[in-house]
Amino acid sequence: MRSVRIGVDTGGTFTDVVAVDEQTGEITTTKTPSTPANPADGFMEGVRKVLRKAAGAEDVTMEAVSAVVHGTTVATNQLLEDRIADLGFVTTEGFEFILEIARQSVPDGYGNSYFWVKPPRIVPVHRVRTVGGRLDHTGAEVRPFDEEQAVAAARWFRDRGITAIGVCFLHSYANPAHELRMREALGREHPDAVVSLSCDVLREYREYERSVTTLVDAAVKPTMRRYIANLAERLEAAGSTRTGNPEKGSAQQGIPEKGSARQGSAERGSGMPFSVMKSNGGVLSAAEVVHQPITTVLSGPAAGALGAALIAATAGHPSVITLDGGGTSTDVAVVVDGEPSLTTEGSIGRYPCKIPMIDIVTVGAGGGSVAWISPEGTLKVGPRSAGADPGPLCYGRGGTEVTVTDAHVFLGRVPAHLLGGEIPLDADAAREGIEALAGKIGLTPERTAAGILEISAFNQSNAIRQITVKRGLDVRDFPMVAFGGSGPLLVCRLIDILGLPSVIVPPDPGNVSAFGLLTVDVKNDYVRTFVTRDLSPKDAEEIFGDLEGQAASALDREGFAADAHVYARSADLRYNGQAYEVRVPAPAGPLDEAWRAEVLERFHTEHRKLYGYGYRDDPRHGVEWVNLRVSGIGPITRPSIGRRPHGDPHPEPTASREVFYDEWGTAPIHRRRDLTAGARITGPAVIEEYGSTLPLHPGFTATMDEFGNLEVRRA
């Protein structure tokens, strides 16, 4: 019987789906329009569609699905749209204004201080309750926990119908006892409450960031629980023939009894294995992820970066820039030696999130980005998007504004249809919209359309500079992997603007994020703040032992055998007097003086790499240890990437059409599926495939490698 694993990435415009046959390694891809009103509808349609496509002459049903992995934007969208209501906050007595005080930093620098208006807090001060009791920075109790105030706070929230509550007490990273007692009081007095504790979400110091991160988790938890439970129920209903007696309505259905389903065998019996992508580059079962929903806030872009990293490394490029161009936005990341860069200084919208996440910069420059005229009369593009509904003018669904996609259609750079003909495009509507916009700004339609694309390319290039130059990296040292439905459309201009050595366009670029979902391990992160200038081996052993114990318990729940557990240590360090830390990997093995010396050496090296200086040999500048971290990893078997046969190095085009680059001219059209390894195409040309298009400008070449990637270079 066939067994397939499915990855589903829900984007703003399309839902991308990939299925991998676990016996043959065959990869099947497809796309379907997203359904913003209920993302689960697009999810299920995508699963059914990819199974139909994978079936061929055989009958492949939901019974053949061994696992489903999902990248979701549900939590992200809720935060970006500020859909946060009826959220409560419990903190230490005397610290009720911690959210109001926040940090002194002002967006866009202190020159903006006069004009900047502080945005509303995630919880207004009238919904903050305080409870007596105090711990010091070592976790020792200074004042006992006030049970009466805890009960009064719980009843206050209950009486006002506030059901999502975050709890963050001072120094609870060192000792969670008071927060645990607060949860007990809420459980007794307000059993309907959904509670997030900072000691569970982020056991790390800096009270403001820890408070906001905990509150973000509490805010998205009810929404994510409903969404995941709904998906798990619908998956179970669709695959009810697997058991004959499906249980419905609980996210627990998404959990396999054993970890072997993640290793590649199909688990039957208790329900379909269903996992969700996390922002840190790992996955977690649905039943576990609903307890830590904040970890999903960048799950889709994270999967794309990991999928692109695997594709690039297989092709011999361990360090690359990744660019994921979608309908609404473009996500950019950097991969160094096969691993995407991580950060704990990220934010979602206006909310800082200190959880570990892949370092991704997002810019509102996608295929649906709207072109508009500013009050000064200049042409602008984005960040507002036409989305999937109504979409660009050329979709013919009632859109009224010109978009980046309309400009591509007008210039002939994309075909008159999407998804292999499934979505016809109205070229006349795009032309009329471009001509109307051109009349308003006094340019020709061609210059207007080309200007829209040029602005979009510069918006993308600014995001790339932000992730490279601002982090001390030379963008010219990195090839770029361009994927997503709109990712390859502007790569020739990006090569010129940034001086990139080359751009790699993978096969089925519109489905790389969904493919990435099937390449990632189960992963959980644990942290403990322990500020000291002299970390003793005894303290290190105690803290790392506790963190690795927590990681082991989580991997046991995921069904991984003990001998398959992998623990990755790291530490945050800084020079005395500094306010922020540098994270470095810490070696495995015994926690002795040699281990300590190795971590310090790595810190000095990394600090010099990041900032251009270090104090390795200067005893006046001591080093301070701040946070100790452990990532618990359950490895999976990754799908292999097949090789293409060699063939004609100068393939004949399948058609031609009028395309505008610098001027109108006839350009050959190539079908990507007809190209073989070694094929070399010289621009001007257009290379089309299901889900994406590569316009090849004059003076550029595209060469297919043995893995089916197109490498674009200046001729």
Image (spheres, helix red, strand yellow):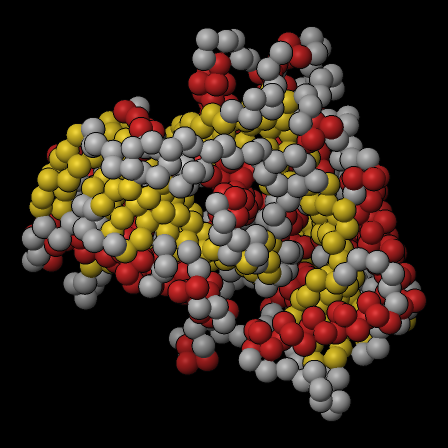
Q: Tell which of 654 and 423 is nearer to you.
A: 654
Q: Tell which of 173 and 404 is nearer to you.
A: 404
Report the side of 241 relative to 650 (left or right). Answer: right
The residue positioned farthest toward the bottom in the image shown: 620
* Residue at (66, 81) in percent of width and height: 578
| Residue 403 shows up from this direction | no
Report the side of 679 relative to 557 (left or right). Answer: left
Question: Which picture quadrant has residue 644?
Answer: top left
Residue 108 pos. (x, y %)? 43, 73
* Residue at (77, 50) in percent of width and height: 567
Report the side of 708 relative to 298 (left or right). Answer: left
Question: Which picture quadrant has residue 254?
Answer: top right
Q: How many marks?
A: 0
* Residue at (56, 22) in percent of width and height: 24
Quadrant of the image containing the C terminus: bottom left
Residue 402 pos. (x, y %)? 21, 45
Residue 19 pos. (x, y %)? 52, 26
Report the side of 436 relative to 536 (left or right). Answer: left
| Residue 692 shows up from this direction | yes
Residue 620 pos. (x, y %)? 74, 91
Q: Tell which of 20 and 674 is nearer to you.
A: 674
* Residue at (34, 63) in percent of width and height: 498
Vertically, is 215 above or below 397?
below
Quadrant of the image containing the N terminus: top right
Vertically, is 371 above or below 486?
below
Question: Which picture quadrant has residue 358?
Answer: bottom right
Vertically, is 98 above or below 615?
above
